[in-house]
Image (cartoon, grey):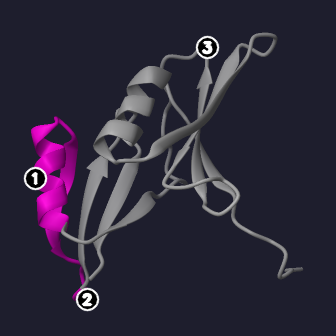
Amino acid sequence: MTSPDWRFLHTMIRVGDLDRSIDFYTRLLGMKLLRRQDFPEGRFTLAFVGYGAETDHTVVELTHNWDTASYDLGTGFGHLALGVADIHGACGKLAEEGAKIVRAPAPMKHGSTIIAFIEDPDGYRIELIEKP
């Protein structure tokens, strides 16, 4: 069942070092830290990052379980995707800042859209898609 009142709110990923992940998403990808809340009884922290307020934008929830330093990514999760105006410039700046570029900008297979892939500090892939 779908409803016109439904809206995609966020995607949650688990991270091993919350401060490192917040730095990556805010400093390197230009998102804002929207909110952060500790849950001492559950031994976890939630941080929400994005390009605009949660009331109007889909955001990323970074979940840090205090007793877990890293996660196996598995094979089910694919990637997050971001639209960028200048993919070559973006990848150049990200590489200068130490971001891991796992696929340099180039046309996608069987198409003409220019894409690239980077990885965040926990190994989650982020697709960059060049948007005019």
Q: Is residue 99 magenta?
A: yes
Q: Can you say whether 95 is above or below 127 in the image?
A: above
Mark 2–mark 1 Cα distance, whole angstroms, equals: 23 Å
In the image: residue 119, left or right of residue 79: left
In the image: residue 71, left or right of residue 93: right
Residue corresponding to mark 1:
92
Neighbours of disc 1 within 10 Å: few (<14), some (14-19), many (20+): some
Query: In this view of the protein, which residue sits in the foreground, 13 or 10?
Result: 10
Q: Is residue 105 magenta?
A: yes
Mark 1–mark 3 Cα distance, whole angstroms, equals: 34 Å
The answer to whether the residues at label 2 and label 3 have Cβ atoms under 8 Å apart is: no
What is the magenta range?
A: 87-112
Tell me residue 87's x, y (percent). Answer: 19, 66
Of the residues shown, which amino acid type is indicated by label 3? Trp
Residue name at image x 40 percent, y 41 percent: 25
Residue name at image x 41 percent, y 44 percent: 124
For the question of whether residue 51 can be seen, the reply is yes
Residue corresponding to mark 2:
111
Image quarter in which the C terminus is found: bottom left
Tell me residue 130's x, y (percent). Answer: 26, 74
Q: Is mark 2 on a helix, strand or loop?
A: loop
In the image: residue 92, left or right of residue 41: left
Residue corresponding to mark 3:
66
Marks 2 and 1, the one that precedes in the sequence: 1
Q: Is mark 3 on a helix, strand or loop?
A: loop
Residue name at image x 85 percent, y 75 percent: 5
